Amino acid sequence: MTDMHHEVVSHASEEKAHSALNTKTIWKVFWILLLVTVFEVAISFTAIPKVVLIWTFIALTIVKSYYIVGYFMHLKFEEVPFQWTVLLPFVLIVYLIFIALYEGTALGLIPG
């Protein structure tokens, strides 16, 4: 039989260490998101070609969504099968939207 006192004390100290790690991680993610956002705003006022700017914004938005979903929505800490269960439908929906827009543009239904 285990000693209940030591189990509770060790569990409490693990939670305290885990919460300190979480606070540190949250601040790190906050600063990363802030820097990416400031970079997005800064490059929006430059003379970069519009196509390059759009693809840069798309890439930076994907980076920001990774940090938001991974850390603030805790998906990074879930089991891998659950991560795929959440992410795969999203990827397929984005793909279907891309295909619909591409076909609409090719058929002349959407001005492009």
Image (tube, helix red, strand yellow):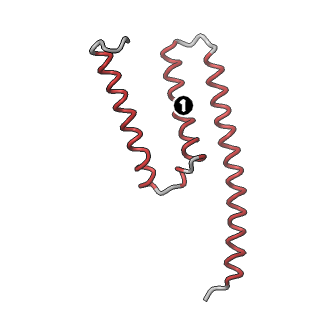
Quadrant in which the C terminus appears: top left
Q: Position of residue 89 (x, y in %)?
A: 38, 42
Q: Position of residue 9 (x, y in %)?
A: 72, 75
Task: Relative to 20, say whether 42 is above or below.
Answer: above
Q: Quadrant of residue 81?
A: bottom left
* Residue at numbered disc 1: 61
Identity, as a three-letter code, of the amino acid under mark 1? Thr
Q: Position of residue 39 (x, y in %)?
A: 64, 25
Q: In screen coordinates, is 75 left or right of 84?
A: right
Task: Relative to 102, say whether 65 is above or below.
Answer: below
Q: Quadrant of residue 10?
A: bottom right
Callout 1: few (<14), some (14-19), or many (20+) C-alpha neighbours within 10 Å?
some
In the foreground, 53 or 90? 90
In the foreground, 70 or 100? 100
Task: Relative to 109, say whether 58 is above or below.
Answer: below
Q: Residue at the location (29% across, 15% down)?
A: 106
Q: Position of residue 31 (x, y in %)?
A: 69, 38
Q: Residue at the location (58% across, 41% down)?
A: 68
Q: In screen coordinates, is 4 left or right of 84?
A: right
In the foreground, 92 or 54? 92
Secondary structure, mark 1, is helix
Q: Quadrant of residue 47?
A: top right
Residue at the farthest bottom position:
1
Residue at the farthest front position:
109
Give the tally of numbered discs.
1
Q: Residue at the location (41% across, 49% down)?
A: 84
Task: Relative to 81, say whether 70 is above or below.
Answer: above
Quadrant in which the N terminus appears: bottom right
